[in-house]
């Protein structure tokens, strides 16, 4: 092989290697920007249709749950996740003419989530109390899956740090739906509709986006922790 040919092959090899490094850099950059790439997450906006959930005058939990779930979905999708919702409008999931409508609704939600074989689920709800002073976001988990408490702890820490919540994680083993779901996930009570401050901020776009951002970061942290373990 002549000297010219050797130099030509050398430069060709360097060019191919440079292209490879450029592609690798772009891929790594994409993974950094999309840390939830291909993670399948199910969001469950509680209540709907004939079931308004908790309410204060003409303010319904079902409406706020769906609004916040849709904002969360957008935030997760931006980070690469695949997101499904158990409902996309104002309806429940009970089968027609169900004798126990609420039980049917909860069963169908659990069935949808289990059949999806998703990586995790978040059930979106609001709390209520006869004591209007009670406020703050709280995570409930079932021990049916050992990952649930890990996820609950991570999210509650974010609630404490970024929303100022003083509440602690709590068991949901006495709640029908969450005993039925096998994949990892938690119930999120994002605030008290019975509290004037919570009731106001939970309907504000800036606050809904804040919740979505912190939950997105919490899920990124959770998946990183699961990989490292």
Image: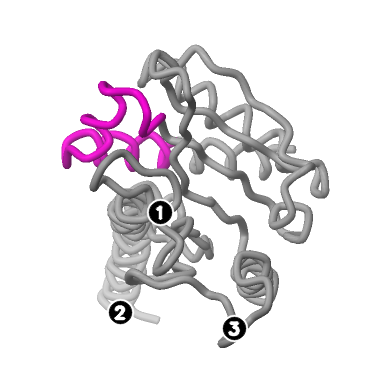
What is the residue that sits farthest to the bottom in this orientation?
96
Q: Which residues are magenta?
A: 192-217
Lower sequence index among marks 1 and 2: 2
Give the residue displayed 52% in from the left and 21% down from the top.
Answer: 157
User: What is the number of the mark on residue 95?
Assistant: 3
- Mark 1–mark 2 contact, CB under 8 Å? no
User: How packed is label 3: few (under 14 Cα within 10 Å), some, or many (20 or more)?
Assistant: some
Lower sequence index among marks 3 and 1: 1
User: How packed is label 1: few (under 14 Cα within 10 Å), some, or many (20 or more)?
Assistant: some
User: How packed is label 2: few (under 14 Cα within 10 Å), some, or many (20 or more)?
Assistant: few
- Measured as percent of width and height from the top left, residue 50 is found at 42, 67
User: What is the number of the mark on residue 31?
Assistant: 1
Give the residue displayed 27% in from the left and 23% down from the top.
Answer: 196
Say whether residue 187 is visible. Answer: yes
User: What is the number of the mark on residue 5?
Assistant: 2
- Measured as percent of width and height from the top left, residue 222 is found at 58, 39
């Amino acid at each position: 092989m002549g000297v010219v040919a050797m130099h030509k092959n050398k430069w060709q090899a360097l060019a191919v290697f440079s292209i490879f490094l450029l592609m690798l850099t772009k891929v790594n950059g994409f993974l950094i920007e999309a840390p939830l790439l291909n993670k399948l997450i199910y969001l469950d906006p509680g209540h709907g249709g004939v079931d308004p959930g908790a309410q204060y005058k003409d303010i319904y939990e079902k409406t706020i749950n769906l609004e916040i779930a849709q904002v969360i979905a957008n935030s997760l999708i931006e980070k690469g996740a695949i997101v499904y919702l158990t409902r996309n409008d104002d309806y429940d999931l009970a089968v027609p003419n169900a004798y126990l409508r609420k039980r049917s609704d909860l069963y169908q939600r659990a069935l949808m989530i289990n059949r999806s074989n998703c990586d995790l689920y978040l059930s979106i709800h609001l709390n209520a109390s006869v004591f209007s002073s009670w406020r703050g976001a709280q995570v409930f988990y079932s021990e049916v899956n050992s990952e649930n408490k890990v996820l609950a702890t991570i999210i509650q820490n974010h609630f404490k740090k970024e929303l100022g919540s003083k509440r602690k994680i709590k068991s949901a083993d006495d709640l029908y739906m969450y005993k039925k779901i096998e994949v990892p996930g938690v119930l999120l009570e994002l605030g008290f509709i019975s509290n004037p401050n919570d009731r106001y901020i939970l309907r504000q776009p800036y606050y809904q986006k804040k919740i979505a951002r912190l939950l997105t970061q919490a899920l990124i942290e959770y998946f990183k922790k699961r990989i490292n373990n």
